[in-house]
C-alpha cells in the first residue's frame, strides 16, 4: 500500500491533470491554467523582463549598474532588440491563445475607467465574475497593444537610417511612454497576483487554485466548473 497521504496523492494528480486540462475539479483544487497556458505566460514574463532590464541601461546611465547582468552595455545594445523581438512573438502567441476567453462583455465595459481603481480598493461587486474579471481582460488587451507599440517603435529605432527624423523622434517618444506605462502596470499585476490575492500565484505555477479561492474571486467560474449553486 502507498505511504503517500491521500491529500498529497490528490495534489500530485492535480499536477498531472493540469498538464493538458483546465477548468476541472481535482480533489480540493481546481485546475485554472493548464501547462501550455503557464508556459506561454512565463515566456512572456521572461522576455518582458529581459527586454526591460537590457533596455534600461541603454535608456539612461542611472541604470548603468544593470548592464553587467548581461555582460556590459555593448551586449545590452545588441541583445535588447532581439529580446524585444522574442517578447513580441511570445505576446502574439499569448494574444491568440487567450483571445476568445478574454472577450470583453458589454457589462464589463464599465471596467475601462475609475472601476480599475475601485477594484484595487476592494470596493467592486464581484458576485458575477467569470474566469477573468473586466480588469484582467483590459490588462490582457492593453498588454497586446503595448507589445505592438514597442515593436513598431523599436523597429524604427533599430534601423534609424531607413526612417525620416520626425518618425524617429515620434518612435522614441512612443517607445519610452509605452515601456514606462507597461512597467507600472506590471507592478500592479504582480501585486494583485501575489500579495493582494493570496492563492493566485499557484494558478500560474502548479496551475491550481483551492476550492475556497475560486468563489471568493471568480464565483461564476466556480459555479460553471463545479456545477454547484
Ligand atoms: C513575476 C512576474 C509575474 C507574475 C508573478 C505573474 C503572475 C500571474 C498570475 C498568478 C496570473 C493568473 C491570474 C489568474 O489566474 O487570475 C497571471 C495572469 C496573467 N499575466 Fe502575469 N505575472 C507576471 C508577469 C507578467 C507579465 C510581464 C505579463 C505581460 C507582459 C503578464 C501578463 C499576464 C496576463 C495577460 C494574464 C491574464 C490576465 C490576468 O490574469 O491578469 N504577466 N499572471
Image: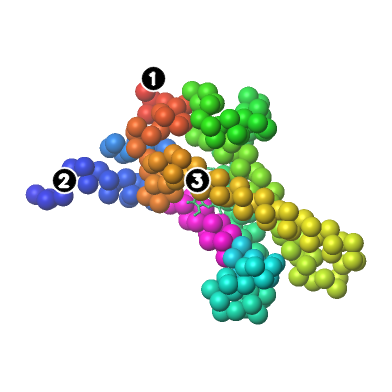
> Quick check: 154 above or below 120?
below
Q: Are marks 3 and 2 in contact (CB under 8 Å)?
A: no
**Residue 191 bears which disc, if any?**
3
SS category of the residue bearing label 2: loop
Q: Is residue 165 visible?
A: yes
Please give the residue where the numbered disc 1 appears in the rendered image. 229
Q: Which residues are magenta?
A: 34-50
Q: Is mark 1 within 8 Å of ligand 1?
A: no
Please state the horizontal and vertical placement of residue 189, each as a whole percent of the image.
54, 46
Q: Mark number for residue 5?
A: 2
The spot of residue 138 in percent (x, y) is: 63, 39
The alpha-carbon separation of the residues under discs 3 and 2 comes to 34 Å
Predominant SS of the magenta segment: helix
SS of the residue at dot 1?
loop
Estimate the spatial distance between the alpha carbons at disc 1 and disc 2, rounded to whole Å: 30 Å
* Figure check: 78 above or below 131: below
- Verify whether residue 36 appears in magenta: yes
Residue sitting farthest toward the top: 229
Residue at 21% x, 42% y is: 7
Q: Is residue 134 left or right of residue 14?
A: right
Query: Total number of numbered labels?
Result: 3
Instruction: Say what secondary structure mark 3 lies in.
Output: helix
Amino acid at each position: 500500500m502507498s505511504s503517500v497521504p491521500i491529500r498529497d496523492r490528490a495534489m500530485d494528480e492535480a499536477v498531472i491533470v493540469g498538464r493538458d486540462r483546465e477548468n476541472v475539479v481535482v480533489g480540493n483544487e481546481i485546475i485554472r491554467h493548464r501547462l501550455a497556458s503557464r508556459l506561454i505566460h512565463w515566456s512572456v514574463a521572461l522576455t518582458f523582463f529581459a527586454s526591460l532590464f537590457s533596455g534600461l541601461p541603454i535608456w539612461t546611465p542611472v541604470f548603468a549598474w544593470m548592464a553587467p547582468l548581461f555582460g556590459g552595455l555593448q551586449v545590452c545594445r545588441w541583445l535588447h532588440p532581439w529580446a524585444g523581438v522574442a517578447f513580441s512573438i511570445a505576446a502574439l502567441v499569448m494574444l491568440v491563445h487567450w483571445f476568445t476567453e478574454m472577450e470583453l462583455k458589454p457589462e464589463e465595459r464599465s471596467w475601462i475607467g475609475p472601476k480599475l481603481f475601485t477594484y484595487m480598493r476592494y470596493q467592486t461587486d464581484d458576485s458575477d465574475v467569470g474566469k477573468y474579471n473586466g480588469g484582467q481582460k483590459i490588462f490582457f488587451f492593453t498588454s497586446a497593444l503595448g507589445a505592438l507599440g514597442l515593436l513598431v517603435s523599436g523597429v524604427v529605432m533599430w534601423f534609424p537610417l531607413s526612417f525620416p527624423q520626425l518618425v524617429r523622434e515620434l518612435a522614441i517618444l512612443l517607445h519610452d511612454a509605452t515601456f514606462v506605462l507597461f512597467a507600472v502596470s506590471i507592478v500592479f499585476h504582480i501585486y494583485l497576483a501575489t500579495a493582494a490575492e493570496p492563492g493566485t500565484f499557484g494558478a500560474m505555477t502548479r496551475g491550481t487554485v483551492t476550492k475556497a479561492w475560486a468563489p471568493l474571486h471568480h464565483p461564476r467560474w466556480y459555479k460553471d466548473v463545479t456545477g454547484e449553486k
